[in-house]
């Protein structure tokens, strides 16, 4: 059993503390029931039998009978899982997440794997935290195992339905089916550029700090600037949740080598430094207010460039800006492009556990509900945006994709499990492509391999981003979206050898 499965089972127990219950006095868990719907059977096992292989072999439960019949094979596999220590990061996350909307939505996602009977629902996370404290107190080593955590949870019986795993996996596959179909129907993948020379010699990087009114501390900004032939154009790049500007510097280098000035702010409430602090229990997960604060980070940068107040930056036009973002940064880019967050779908669909479009990105989107009112912002200086793997289906009203004044390019990977392409990209972009917006699919792209990271020349998407930004600034009066507008992105070459890219916008029409 892999460590990832162990973490999932641990999270399932966390979720179970919030699940529907049958009324009865609270008491410690005594029994685990493992259901196998396809075989129309289930196995029960008492907690006391899970303490050791000898206890299970000598027990009287269904699972003990199976263990004897398998000559101990069951106990060897099961106890290897249940006797592992709870990851310390999970205990710290639980402690720092009490009352967090992000935690509450994570509970809803995982809760379909199991239930705790005779347990009152608790979406605050307090029950799980108290159970962890009890399990740590009862553990001889001070680091509880999974079975010790089960024993500490209040309730009557833990019930795990393994058939639900199949349902969830089926849903995840379905959320990629349209993307695979459209990719197959579209024209051949766009050819890649000829091997590019190293672009780093044409750009330089430096760190600056910017005092802003909306945050207590100055904003850290990574600047990537051309060393020659500056074109006076400004591009902003927004990183995703628990990420950093450094992981997107390669995109900046490609653009700067063509003359663009590129600024990458660190979003301090949701960057990789904040993730470390969260996992050590110092802070809770990102607050909903970050939805608006991230927008303000980018607009503050544009303001500073316009006023000549960004250290060492001059001669750059801040009246026509392109914004690029990945994941949450892609959502921020869409906000900058004129899409205004709405609360209606968040309120109606977030509680729907069986919604066929439910996906992992809903955990993040639903956590934004309390920040929507503070994120209804506009910046008319943004003329175009690129959104790579954007969580968007719940946050934005579909008609807005037609009405936005900025051109949009959305990029989604066919293998993205975090922000799956069908509900999060294809469905919304059906509304947008008749107005000149475009959707590019990356065959085999996932939520992480489309980021450039340490790859030179912008990684998979570097040539695509450069082609799009060049086209934006060459479009003139035809840039404004309108019914029947011609797409900006031509036939290439802006593709990639390892992860083929296709513009499927004509297929969506």
Image (cartoon, rainbow, N blue to C red):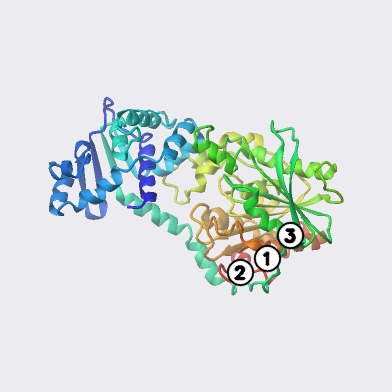
| Residue density around tag 3, few if under 14, some if 14–19, many if 20 or more, within 10 Å | many
Report which quarter residue 121 is drawn in. top left
Q: Residue 305: x, y in percent?
A: 81, 45
Q: Residue at x 80, y 43 (%)?
A: 310
* SS state under label 1: helix
Q: Which residue is painted at 83% across and 41% down in the image?
A: 309
Residue 467 position by quadrant: bottom right
Give the residue number, with chain letter if any, for mark 3: 255
Residue 84's x, y, as percent? Answer: 32, 43
Which residue is most to the top? 25
Q: Nearer the viewer, residue 505 or 158?
A: 158
Q: What is the distance, in whole Å, between disc 2 and disc 3 at their CAs?
A: 17 Å
Farthest-out residue, right: 315
Q: Which residue is mark 1?
A: 463
Q: Is residue 41 visible?
A: no
User: Which badge, 2 or 3, is on the more N-terminal residue?
Assistant: 3
Q: Are marks 1 and 2 in contact (CB under 8 Å)?
A: yes
Does the image show residue 276? yes
Q: Compute the Cα span from label 1 to label 2.
A: 8 Å
């Amino acid at each position: 059993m892999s460590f990832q499965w162990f973490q999932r089972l641990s999270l399932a127990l966390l979720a179970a503390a919030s699940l529907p219950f049958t009324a009865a006095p609270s008491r410690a868990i005594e029994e685990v029931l493992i259901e196998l719907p396809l075989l129309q059977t289930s196995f029960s096992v008492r907690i006391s039998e899970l303490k050791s292989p000898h206890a299970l072999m000598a027990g009287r439960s269904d699972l003990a009978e199976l263990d004897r019949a398998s000559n101990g094979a069951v106990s060897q596999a099961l106890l290897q899982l249940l006797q592992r220590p709870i990851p310390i990061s999970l205990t710290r996350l639980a402690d720092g997440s009490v009352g967090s909307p992000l935690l509450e939505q994570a509970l809803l996602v995982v809760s379909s794997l199991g239930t705790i009977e005779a347990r009152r629902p608790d979406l605050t996370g307090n029950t799980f935290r108290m159970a962890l404290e009890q399990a740590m107190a009862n553990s001889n080593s001070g680091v509880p195992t999974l079975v010790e955590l089960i024993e500490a949870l209040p309730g009557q019986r833990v019930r795990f339905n393994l058939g639900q795993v199949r349902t969830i996996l089926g849903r995840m596959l379905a959320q990629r089916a349209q993307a695979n179909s459209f990719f197959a129907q579209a024209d051949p993948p766009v050819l890649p550029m000829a091997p590019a020379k190293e672009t780093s010699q044409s750009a330089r990087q430096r760190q600056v700090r910017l005092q802003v009114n909306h945050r207590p501390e100055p904003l850290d900004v990574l600047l990537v600037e051309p060393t020659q032939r500056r074109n006076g154009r400004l591009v902003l790049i927004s990183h995703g949740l628990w990420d950093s500007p450094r992981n997107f510097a390669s995109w900046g280098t490609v653009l700067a080598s063509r003359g663009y000035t590129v600024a990458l702010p660190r979003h301090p409430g949701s960057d990789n430094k904040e993730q470390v602090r969260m996992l050590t229990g110092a802070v809770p997960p990102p607050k909903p207010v970050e939805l608006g604060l991230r927008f303000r980070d980018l607009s503050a940068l544009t303001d500073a460039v316009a006023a000549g107040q960004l250290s060492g930056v001059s001669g750059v036009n801040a009246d026509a800006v392109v914004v690029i973002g990945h994941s949450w940064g892609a959502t921020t880019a869409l906000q900058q492009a004129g899409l205004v967050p709405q609360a209606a779908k968040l309120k109606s669909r977030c509680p729907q556990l069986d919604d066929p479009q439910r996906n992992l990105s809903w955990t993040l989107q639903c956590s934004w509900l309390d920040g929507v009112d503070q994120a209804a912002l506009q910046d008319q200086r943004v003329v175009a945006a690129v959104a790579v793997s954007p969580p968007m289906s719940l946050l934005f009203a579909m008609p807005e994709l037609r009405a936005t004044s900025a051109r949009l390019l959305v990029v989604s990977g066919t293998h993205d499990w975090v922000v799956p392409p069908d509900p999060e990209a294809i469905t919304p972009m059906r509304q947008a492509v008749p107005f000149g917006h475009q959707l590019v699919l990356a065959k085999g792209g996932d939520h992480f391999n489309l980021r450039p990271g340490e790859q030179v020349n912008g990684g998979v998407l570097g040539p695509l981003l450069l082609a799009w930004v060049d086209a934006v600034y060459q479009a003139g009066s035809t840039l404004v979206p309108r019914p029947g507008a011609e797409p900006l992105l031509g036939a290439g070459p802006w593709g990639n050898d390892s992860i083929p890219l296709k513009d499927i916008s004509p297929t969506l029409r």
